[in-house]
Each structure stands twice: as structure tokens, then as C-alpha cells.
Amino acid sequence: LNKRIGVLMGGLSSEREISIKSGMAVLKALNEKGYDAIPIDVGRNIAKELKEKHIDVAFLTLHGRYGEDGAIQGMLEMMGIPYTGSGVLSSVITMDKIITKIVLLYHNLPTPKFQVIENGEFSSINIRFPVIVKPSREGSTIGVNIARNHDELVSAYKDAKNYDKRILIEEYIEGKEITLGIIDGNVLPVIEIVPKSGFYNYKSKYTPGMTEYVIPANIGEDIEGIVKNIGLKAYRILYCSGAVRVDFILSKDNIPYILEVNSIPGMTETSLLPKSAKHAGIDFNELVEMMLKGASLKR
Ligand SMILES: Nc1ncnc2c1ncn2[C@@H]1O[C@H](COP(=O)(O)OP(=O)(O)O)[C@@H](O)[C@H]1O
Ligand SMILES: [Mg+2]
């Protein structure tokens, strides 16, 4: 309780605004619990700032590049400052959807069929329309588009290219969107996500009222068990620690396809992981304290 905690937020990614919201919510929770916690906006001089402010533990509420991708984790390992969440390798892998899918496939976990496109070689694509086009390393549905024909594919690819040089084309899975929170290797209730617009994009994610959430998901006990099993397996094989969230589409024939694993899930009070924790009887402040207690060096 006498350690000084830096809540690292903001950062250099396109999810900066969301990260600040997560960070401020976590900061409030830590202060309410009586911890000496201060906000730190992560910029290029972060190492110096951590030293000057005498930070003993880093609570990471960063999303996207430099924050969720192993960069800051590597720096903290070097500096010997314990941090929340997953370690370097896990962060690197889970930030990169292509590499994540390769690891999932190696372990026979379901993930939509995909192809990697680097230089607009559209003629080599042998996945049927509609397809989903996404940058390999982004979040919040930024740069993610559905394409129903060749023209849409070309413009979706162009959009994705604004965010990453590595682009994946995925089979579009029709079904229910669900997500599974995991904390310290324990699963939380599955959430079913019903965006009113039909597409769970940036707007649907962050505009109150644009999306309906069903907890626990209306998928039946058997399927819920399978989803939790698959999610936990993904957590283990991707070397995750602390709190993560696994995003799925449950197809019409009840196959839970993993879309991605988020190593630093959103942490506003209305974000998915806190919602799910609350349903399991863990209130927001308690959840934040659990995450803090898992802070460590991981190498
Ligand atoms: N293969 C797919 N089939 C159907 N919908 C998809 C597929 N991939 C992504 N989506 C939709 O796009 C959203 C964002 O995709 P996701 O892979 O979770 O990336 P991120 O959340 O990191 O931007 C998902 O929540 C889902 O609504
Ligand atoms: Mg997602």
C-alpha cells in the first residue's frame, strides 16, 4: 500500500483517447482504495518521467501501438519496474492479429480462414466474398471493413493500409458476436454484443446506447462452456497474464471463432471486461485491485 503506482495512459497510438478514459477510471479506483497512484501520460520521455516521479509499479491502461505491443513492457523489464498484464512476448503476439492466428491454428483453435496481403495482390485471394479486411496491429475496429465485391475490397484495403503495412483478409463469419474476459486464468461470464447498427465499429463501441450487451450471453450452457475452454486455451498458449479479453464470433453452426485477443482490455467502468466482472460479483475497484496485485516482472 505504500508503493507509488503510475497509471500509464494516453500514449502514441490511435486509441489514445480511449486509453485516457481507461486510465482515469483506474486512477480513481486506486485512489479510492487508498493507493498512492498518479496519472502518467506516456510520451517519448517516459523512462525519465518514471524515474523522476519515483514510480514503483506501472499500471498499464495503454491501448495499441507502443502500449499493448510489448514496447513499453520491454522498457519496464529493462528498468526493473513491475507492471500489470501480459509480458513482452505475449503482448507482441496478441497485438499482431496475423501472428496470433498462426499460433491459434498451430494449436487447432478455431479462427476465421485468412490470407495476408502486403502489396495489393488481390488476384491471389481465394476466400469468397464477403470478406473482412483489417490491419494486423490495430484496435477499436479502426481500419476494419467488410468487402462484398472487388471494388469494396480495393477501398477496404486502402483504408487498412493507413494503419499498418501488414493487412489480413478474413472470411466473414455470420453469427453472434461474443467476448470472454479472463483474469489471472479465471474466466468471467461471456458477454453477447448486439450493435444496433449491425457492425461493432468504433462508433458502436464508444457511443452509449448504440450497442446492447447481454450477460451472460444467450448461447446455452454447453456452448458457453466450450467458449470458456477455447478462450482459456488461447490465454495459455499465447502466454497471457493478468486480465485479457478474447473476442469471438459464434457462427450459426455454433463454432466459436476467435477473432483476436486483447492484452489490455478497455477499463472504463462501462467497458466489457468490467461489465462482465461486475456480473460475477467483482466491482470495478475490486477488479482494479486484483489487476494491480498481479503486477510483476515476467521474464
Ligand atoms: N471474420 C469476421 N467476421 C465477422 N465480423 C468480423 C470478423 N472480423 C472482425 N469482425 C468485426 O469487426 C470487429 C473488429 O474486429 P477485431 O478483429 O475484433 O479487431 P479490433 O477490435 O482489434 O479492431 C469485430 O468486433 C467484429 O464486429
Ligand atoms: Mg476486437
Image (spheres, grey):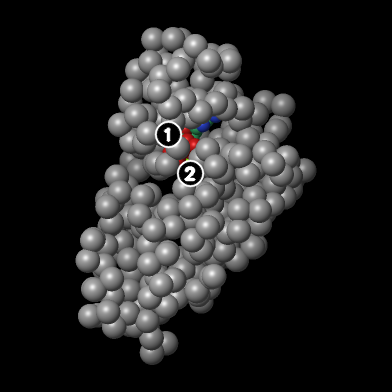
Residue 33 vertical placement versus 2 (above, below)? above
Check if mark 1's residue and mark 2's residue have beta carbons within 8 Å.
Answer: yes
Camera-side residue of 172 and 176: 172
Disc number for residue 166: 1
Rendered view: 221 above or below 287: above
In the structure shown, which secondary structural element does the residue marked by tag 1 occupy?
loop
Q: Nearer the viewer, residue 244 or 296?
A: 296
Q: Residues within 10 Å of mark 1 (few under 14, many from 20)?
A: some
Q: Residue at x 47, y 48 (%)?
A: 95
Observer-nearest residue: 261 or 200? 261
Badge 2: few (under 14), some or many (20 or more) residues near its Cα, within 10 Å?
some
Residue 212 placement, left or right of 54: right
Coordinates of residue 46 in the picture (x, y in percent): 26, 67
- Can you identify the residue that label 2 sits on? 96
Type of residue at label 2? Answer: Asp
Q: How many marks?
A: 2
Q: Is residue 145 left or right of residue 87?
A: left
Measure the C-alpha gap from mark 1 to mark 2: 9 Å
Secondary element under disc 2, as helix, strand or loop, is loop
Which of disc 2 and disc 1 is earlier in sequence? Answer: 2
Residue at 64% of width from left, 50% of height from top? 234
Name the quadrant containing residue 162. Answer: top left
User: Which residue occupies 40% across, 23% down?
Assistant: 119
Q: Position of residue 155 (x, y in %)?
A: 35, 18
Query: Looking at the picture, does residue 164 appear above or below residue 95?
Result: above
Q: Quadrant of the image for the C terminus?
A: bottom right
- Relative to 279, 154 lies left or right: left
Give residue 113's quadrant in the image: top right
Amino acid marked by disc 1: Arg
Residue shown at 52%/49% (left/top)?
94
Residue 290: percent from left, percent from top:
52, 72
